[in-house]
Every structure is written in structure tokens, then in C-alpha cells.
Image (cartoon, rainbow, N blue to C red):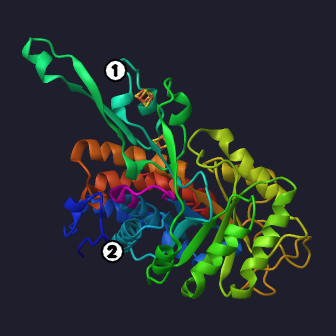
Amino acid sequence: MALSFCNSKATPHLQGVGVKFRGNRGVESVKNLIKKVGIPPLVSSPPESLRRGTWVKLICGASFEDVVDIRNLSLVYTLAGVDCIDCAADASAVGAVNEGIETARDICDLRRPWVMISVNDDEDLHFRKAEFDPEDCPLDCSRPCELVCPANAISIEEEQSDAQVSYGGSVPHKLKGGVITERCYGCGRCFPVCPYDRIRAATYVRDASTTSRLLKRNDVDAVEIHTNGRQTARFEELWDSLGDSMGYLKLVAVSLPYNGDSTLSLMNALYTVMEPRLSLFNLWQLDGRPMSGDIGRGATRESIAFAVCLATARNRPPGFLQLAGGTNAHTVNGLKREGLFRMYSGENSKDKTMVPGLPNSPHALISGIAYGGYARKIVGRVLNSMHSKHGPALIEHHPEYLLEALVEALALVRTVKGYDQFTSK
Ligand code: SF4
Ligand code: SF4
């Protein structure tokens, strides 16, 4: 199989490279682990996972566009059995996700996860990039921005002055580098730590006609629309612009923050906009504390509180509910404590909301969990270690790293999927 990133920007050196598995013993270890875990028989189809409350989505990041990492993450999490992989609405990112998925399926005969692209209808935290000119930074700055960035998206070097070197001294003349745009996913952690207030946020809105074209690809299955909840006019405008491209999809997700008492009325208003052309599954992504799952245990509290508010709300519009924003290894336990993990609606339940496409069928009150920053962090540690030793490599070329990354991914995905027989390595 040849790599074929569409319009690859970040990794032209990888185009056309044939995938060969080096070190068959390593790949056999990966296959053996997958066999031992028994993933194929336990992995249900994405709609079935939604219904059963075992849906897991990997969020690569609405603004994250490093195609090497996106591809490797997609490969690892496909092997771990996720139902969906969500990426930037960008042809290169979509190509990288699909390349990762198909490479994983060459290793092991797994069902294909859905591919989702994320767009926004207005300004949104997920759709921004940090920017600064390193030449404006004081030479003696201790560069806390580099340290705080969870994506290794800031790299600053000192440029030495030639003139001064000729006098025998090698002193820094100015700083160079800055934000590695394709790696920045807009988390915002660098903004407050800059002591000189040099970092700006550049926000953007994804172009609807580009999105429409991507949705018509046969390797894109779903779209997620991020809305800030302040009004519905822009959502309606985007929904109308996407037009008949929605007919090519299996799922539309709406990602929204908690807006207190107005949350339900907003959801109902959005549903009213969608309903006339809603011939596919719909899902509400409850974005608790955006882009924070990697920070620590407590980051998941807000997404769980959001789920508690909505799970049994009587006047909730139809659609699956899925957690995001701050989700991490503690999220399932939090749901269990609230009695919401794999709790089913149905005739004896207070929950009477129906899900399009699943008439008269009981379904889980909470359909699943999307993991972003935390999922990327645990596998990212392995990818970073591989990259520092081998450069921007394809992970299947280094099965020892693939095995290590898969163990990390399985430890997270199993909390939802229940791969009970899983034991590390
Ligand atoms: S916004 Fe976040 S990801 Fe982007 S450079 Fe700053 S810390 Fe890194
Ligand atoms: S912390 Fe601010 S001033 Fe210092 S290197 Fe980073 S952007 Fe420049």
C-alpha cells in the first residue's frame, strides 16, 4: 500500500513511501496483543456502540494538522477499537486519518471507524491558533510558553550574531522559530504565561463550501458542528450552506458548551433548524471543559455535570448524548458514580427521548465518550520518543513503539468498551 496524503503540507517527504512492516516479530506481538484482548468480536458497529453506550471517539483536534501524528494516532486508536475519529476539516488531515485506519486494518482485520470532520459556525476556542513573532521576544525570556504547550507546538532558538562571533564571542542576537502552526490546536495555555503579553490568538471559521466538498468524499462519514450557544442564526446559515452534502453522511454531531438554564432551549432551537433535513443519526457533544482532559483527574467533572443535567431532562430534543471536554481515564468512574454508565432508557425509564433511526429501541442515556487531549497525551509520549530517535516516522515501521502505544490506547478505550480480559503486554 502506498501512502497518499491528500495535498500533504507537513510531510512531503512521506509521500509515495511504501509501507513495509520492519521487524516481523514486533508486528506479531501487536497481532498477538489484539488477539489476546479479543477486540474484533467485542467491537460493535458504530451505531450499535451508540445504542449500547460503548461509543468511543478519538479527537485528533479541530485545529490540529500535523499529518504524521494524525496518521499514527489514527492507526493506534483504530487498533484499539474506537468507533469514530474526528479531525480538522482539511483534506490533508482527512487523508492522514484514512491512511492510519487502512494501515491498521492491514495489520488486523478490524471494522472501519467512522471519520468525522469538525467545523464551526462562529468564533470558537477550538478554531484558533497562537501566534507571535519571536523577534519581538526579549532575549532573556525564560520561555514559559514552550514549557506549557501540551502539543510541543512552540519551538524557539537563539540566533547567534555573525559579527559578534568574529570577535570571539558567541552571543545570541535574536530569537527565531515560534509557533509550529500545524501542531497548535488552540488550547490557549501559552497566552497567560507569557510575561510580555506577546502571544495573540488568530481565530478562524471553516469555509462551508470546502466543508461541503469534504463531506461528499466516500471516506468521510460524519460532521461535527461546534456552536458557541450564543445564537442560532449562524448555525442555521451553516446548516443551509452544507445543503445536500449532509445526505452523504451517517451522523451529524453538534458540539456545545453548557449554558446553564438556556442549554436545553438552545438545543431545541438547533434541532428545529436541523429536523427538516435530518435523515441521519444525530448526536449532542457535551463539551464540559474544552481541551483540558490531559490536565488532570478533576478536568472531567464539568463534562459529567453536563451529562447529569441532560440525561433525564424531559424536554430534551432527540439525539445521542456524548461527553467531551476534559474527558480522561477518570470519566467512566465519574459516570458510574452518577449511575449513568451504560444506563438504558426505555419504557420503564423517565427518559422518553427517541433517537432517529432507532425507533422503539432502548438506548443508553449516555452513548459514549470522546477523548482528545488525554488520548493524544498518552500515545503522544510514545510518538515523541519514537520521533526523537527516528525522526517523523510511521509507527508500524517500529513495532516496539506501536506495541507500547497500543497498550496505552487500550488502557483508555477499555474503560468504555470493557475489554475485561485485557492485561498489559
Ligand atoms: S495555544 Fe496551546 S497548542 Fe497552541 S501553541 Fe499555545 S499552548 Fe501550544
Ligand atoms: S513567553 Fe512570551 S516573550 Fe517569552 S518566548 Fe514565549 S512568547 Fe516570547
Disc 2 marks which amino acid?
Asp
Question: Residue 416 occupies which quadrant of the picture?
Answer: bottom right
Residue 114: in sight, yes or no?
no
Q: Residue at x 55, y 73 (%)?
A: 43
Residue placed under numbered mark 2 in the picture: 106
In the image, is residue 58 above or below residue 408? below
Q: Is residue 328 left or right of residue 87?
A: right
Q: Is residue 259 left or right of residue 387?
A: right
x and y, in percent, of residue 164 in the image:
14, 16
Tag on residue 139?
1
Q: Which residues are magenta?
A: 60-70
Q: Residue at x 17, y 22 (%)?
A: 161
Disc 1 marks which amino acid?
Leu
Q: Residue at x 74, y 87 (%)?
A: 276
Question: Residue 226 occupies which quadrant of the picture?
Answer: bottom right
Task: Judge whether residue 66 is colored magenta.
Answer: yes
